[in-house]
Image (cartoon, helix red, strand yellow):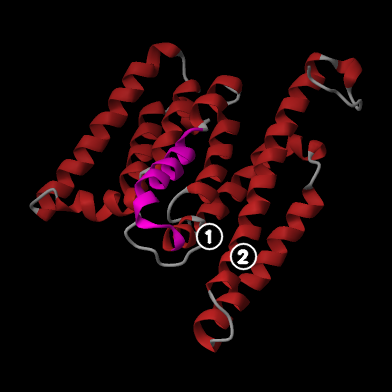
Amino acid sequence: MIITDRPSMAMIWIALAGYLGLYPAMLVVPLILMQPSSKSFGMITTFALSIVGLLGISRWLVGSWDFIAATYGVILFLSDLTPNTGMFWYFFIEIFDQFRSFFMVVFQFHAFIFVAPLCIKLRHQPLFVITVLCGIMSVFKSYPAVGDAALFLGLLPLHDELFEYFRYGFLITNIYLYSSVLAPIFWHLWLYAGSGNANFFYAITLVYNLGSVLLLIDMIFSVLRRDYDIENPNAIGKHVVQK
């Protein structure tokens, strides 16, 4: 309701989030879908002016544009390979330097590529698209944190009508519990006890991200199946194969 009634404030807050972390800017498109098309230009203008204003303030405070390379440059080009819950750091530690640029473009493009198909296919459910994109960011951004997953999981109850369609709920729950317990243990074994290596921690982050990806797949399946059941009530409870 707040987003629907106050589109300008929504754009300002998304601009602030994009200014701080870059990736939240992908939420602009589903937010625009929430409003009549007549407001689209005004929302885009508000977002653009907010970003320009925030960057201008930063330029004034810092005294130069060097902060762009030190902030967005690090996010895009991954100059800091400190281990985290994401999938970038280990891959780019191991990769040969001559292939780094190519795979950097592929990885970053992969994080944003889902915006268009989701907004086209689920254009009548922009709030669901926002939730899915938050989940995608929590998995595929260059420096994810536990807070990204917390935001994604915190938005799930908004779509509680989909829970009955979930197929892998038990498996996903166990994956999250499994990774939550073992991740700090493997971290300790690697960095403090010295009885493990980077493979220990990276393996458990892959398990954790697998759970998030399965949850995203289950969510999209559930919303498509629910829409199909609404349009075809005779098919409720039946196996459907799309040809």
Q: Which quarter of the rendered picture does the C terminus lie within?
A: top right
Check the image and report above or below for 219 versus 92: above
Q: As rendered, which of 166 and 127 lies closer to the eye? A: 166
In this rendering, position of residue 88 left or right of residue 46:
right
Spatial CA distance of label 1 from label 2 is: 17 Å
Residue 99 at what x, y percent from top left?
39, 50
| Residue 74 in sight in this render | yes
Name the disc covering residue 146, or none.
1
Where residue 117 appears, x then y in whole percent? 55, 25
Which residue is depicted at the point 43% across and 52% down? 142
At which x and y percent is residue 103? 42, 46
Quarter occupied by residue 204: bottom right
Mark sitting on residue 216: none
Q: What is the residue that sits farthest to the bottom in this orientation?
A: 193
Residue extending farthest to the top is 38
Helix, strand or loop at label 1? It is helix
Identify the residue at image location x=52%, y=33%: 114
Q: Main secondary structure of the magenta part?
A: helix
Residue 124 appears anywhere in the view: no
Q: Which residue is mark 2?
A: 203
Name the residue: 51% across, 86% down.
192
Q: Whole-percent x and y of residue 208?
A: 63, 58
Residue 106 lies in magenta, yes or no? yes
Residue 199 lies in magenta, yes or no?
no
**Amino acid found under the numbered disc labelled 2:** Ala
Residue 94, located in which quarter of the rendered image?
Answer: bottom left
Mark 1 is on which residue type?
Answer: Val
Magenta span: 94-113
Q: Say which of marks 1 and 2 sits in front.
A: 2
Mark 1 Cα shell of 10 Å, populated few (<14), some (14-19), many (≥20): few
